[in-house]
Image (cartoon, rainbow, N blue to C red):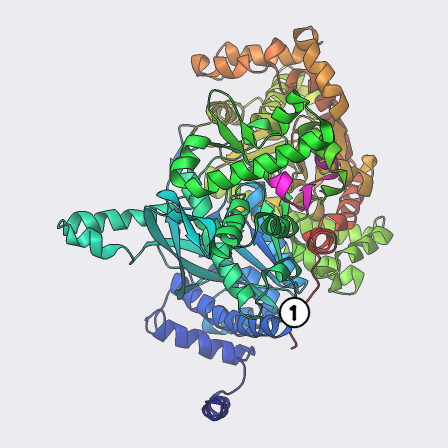
Amino acid sequence: SSLDRTAKAERMFELMDGFLKNDPVSLQKDILDHVEYTVARSRFSFDDFEAYQALSHCIRDRLIERWHDTQIHFKRKDPKRVYFLSLEYLMGRSLSNSIINLGIRDQCADALSQLGFEFEVLAEQEGDAALGNGGLARLSACQMDSLATMDFPAWGYGLRYQYGLFRQVILDGFQHEQPDYWLNFGNPWEIERVHVTYPVKFYGTVEEDISNGEKYKVWIPGEMVEAVAYDNPIPGYGTRNTITLRLWAAKPSNQHDMEAYNTGDYIDAVVTRQRAETISSILYPDDRSHQGKELRLKQQYFFVSASLQDIIRRFKDGHKDLNQFPDKVALQLNDTHPALAIPEVMRILVDEERLGWNEAFDITCKIFSFTTHTVLAEALEKIPVDLLESLLPRHLQIIYDINSHFMEELKRRIGLDYNRLSRMSIVEEGAVKSIRMANLSIFCSHTVNGVSRLHSELLQTRVFKDFYEMWPEKFQCKTNGVTQRRWIVVSNPSLCALISKWLGTESWIRDIDLLMGLREYAADISLHQEWQMVRKINKMRLAEYIEATSGLKVSLDAMFDVQIKRIHEYKRQLLNIIGIIHRYDCIKNMAKDDRKKVVPRICIIGGKAAPGYEMAKKIIKLCHAVAEKINNDSDIGDLLKLVFIPDYNVSVAEMIIPGADLSQHISTAGHEASGTGCMKFLMNGCLLLATADGSTVEIIEEIGEDNMFLFGAKVHEVATLREKGSTIKVPLQFARVVRMVRDGYFGFQDYFQSLCDTVEGSNDYYLLGADFESYLEAQAAADKAFVDQKKWTQMSILSTAGSGRFSSDRTIQDYAEQTWGIEPCRCPL
Ligand code: C3B
């Protein structure tokens, strides 16, 4: 009764002594309590890892407080919500980020030092949460940070893989993959919600039934598993708002059990049940390619089904009329991976809620928006019809129905242009009949966007031209961004302090446009000195890491030249390596006196290759073989070193980026949808050596061509160059370097032949040969600028100052206004 409730609430308030306090003494007390009661160690004896665990729990408590308040506030205000559906999130570490967003970094450091611990050392104890592959997954993480910071009523949904992205181990220069069982030591950043579970169905048959004189379809599933929610609170910076990233884990279902157990074989029945857990066991390590595997499809549907049940339950808690769904809910498809949400919403509305087809379709088209992250044809998901038919028979029917509506509409508008109809169809006929998930997503979403301006244009003029001509108003551009909280404040504290000092405020951490204020001081000598000092500190940190991982001692006076990202032919790490071999060759053939003029370089490469991607693995091996040669050549000494940093991940990036002088973003024009690494380097004052591809085109507009080293064919030139094929004029030096590799100069002669084949003559699809000359010119320009440290420092300051447009805060603001139609909902302090 209500009286009971009031009495209960009063008693509750009596017992509560207010919110957790954040002064160092309260923090110490809480840390020690967690040492004793959570970690179950004596408070008189615990090590760094146990201190990390206790501190994390102490921070977790504070996150939970804010998170509860935020969720209650959202419920009370009932704003329109956005649900971000993504199969991948690369969160990295959470401790430092949480402490900074909570605004208690200094208090924590104080509290710890009095207990005899150092904050930085404890932060290093944490492993990365690597539930994703590359750019797309880290983008999701950056966007969650912005959604929380900007007070948007948002939820992220994803999968809680037990094995994240594989660990890369290098043996004899070859990549080996090791499982990342990241939950081994517990995960303080998640909250298991044993009561938030939903059944997810698979297989079976579709039958017809009649109720109230109307026919409808019933899906009789053949298998059922349970989805359990794990909530990860995401704190905003400078706000109390703390939003939810809800990840689903698969557990055996308790329904259907009686039958299995009654048939007699108890052991077999348990083992079968156990298999349910495999659905969320492992992240697919392929970046931009899909293989039509059943388990992957199961993961996609599992995630979509659980998320939608949760979203609809939340909607129904307060709303009856499903026609209001689009006023309250926006669903964001992060690439096509969650696109099964479309037929699933239709199934729920038509089969379960018994809405008419048109009414249901109208609702569906109003809630979905779709971001595509690629231009590569092999990355566009196609699901074999056979697979879908057996796993999700009802969904296949619905997709066919959607397609026939689609084809009808098309015929009305364009007539019987069969070529075009078959290009646009959601169903692809052919050797393997399959469903084109991108076509489904475009047709059923109210907006479709690319992730940089160039990419968005390519979608309109090439990849989805037919669709654009039909519905130009659907197409938008949302240039990617990254969060300055993680990529400056957490990872580069010295630069953070320097920026705040010169701007006279910390407000840029929430309001990135203020960074432009640095332009005013770009020529100021005392800023230059401080700026160079900060850069030196970060280079030192990176040099120590290099020495620790590879044993190589590097000089801080050398230019640190970095390329870190997934290994992919289109990203052209091979161009970088060929350039390095060329540099080596030049130094070797130089007169002793000329060597004095060489700008010393430390070339740093890092990145993982998809386990089945043979050429990418050969590139890694070549990098090691070349490094072996160069680093041990006494003629070369300190003039050139090549280091491969193993197991590249978010926390390694946080350490490398602030220490880089130059970074390379050298994809063949028209292939990198956006690129986000370049934005992180830019914010940290690292100069870019880049092609005009993806988001670098927009970076040029912000900082000007003079402040970076641009080279290579432009997008509109690529097709012509490819047509020219083997008649292109390729510089002799290029051919010479490839010959060195072929002739076994770096060993492994047989192994490298097929790699060399990919860049010679008409095979050179990514145009390494065609771009080589201008690549070398850009490199020479970088050397020249580096010698003039005054000029270099100014370019560096102007890079940071011009990076504001590339904050994910700006990206999220654009999505909120132009795509989702949502508004901030700020929890009172
Ligand atoms: C990546 C693209 O390759 C990048 O250009 C882009 O910056 C990011 O997404 C974020 O938009 N991408 C990826 O990491 N995985 C895919 N499957 C497709 C694109």
User: For the residue labelled by badge 1, is the local secondary structure a helix, a strand or a loop?
Assistant: loop
Q: Which residues are magenta?
A: 441-457
In the orientation shown, which residue stands out farthest toward the top?
Answer: 727
Place of residue 2 in the rendered image (x, y in percent of width and height, measured from the top left): 49, 90
User: Is residue 823 on the magenta stretch?
Assistant: no
Place of residue 468 in the rendered image (x, y in percent of width and height, measured from the top left): 73, 34
Q: Quadrant of the N terminus?
A: bottom left
- Of the residues shown, which amino acid type is indicated by label 1? Thr
In this rendering, the count of numbered labels is 1
Q: Residue at x 50, y 53 (%)?
A: 348
Front residue of this view, candidates 696 and 504: 696
Q: Residues within 10 Å of mark 1 (few under 14, many from 20)?
A: many
Please indicate whether residue 630 sits to the left or right of residue 412 in the image.
left
Place of residue 489 in the rendered image (x, y in percent of width and height, measured from the top left): 64, 58
Front residue of this view, candidates 245 and 785: 245
Please indicate whether residue 756 sits to the left or right of residue 639 in the image.
left
Q: Residue at x 31, y 56 (%)?
A: 253
In the orientation shown, which residue stands out farthest toward the front?
Answer: 213
Place of residue 78 in the rendered image (x, y in percent of width and height, measured from the top left): 63, 70
When asked about the image quadrant of residue 29, the answer is: bottom left
**Residue that badge 1 annotates:** 239
Q: Is residue 564 visible?
A: no
755 is higher (above) or lower (below) than 381: above
Q: Residue at x 60, y 26 (%)?
A: 570
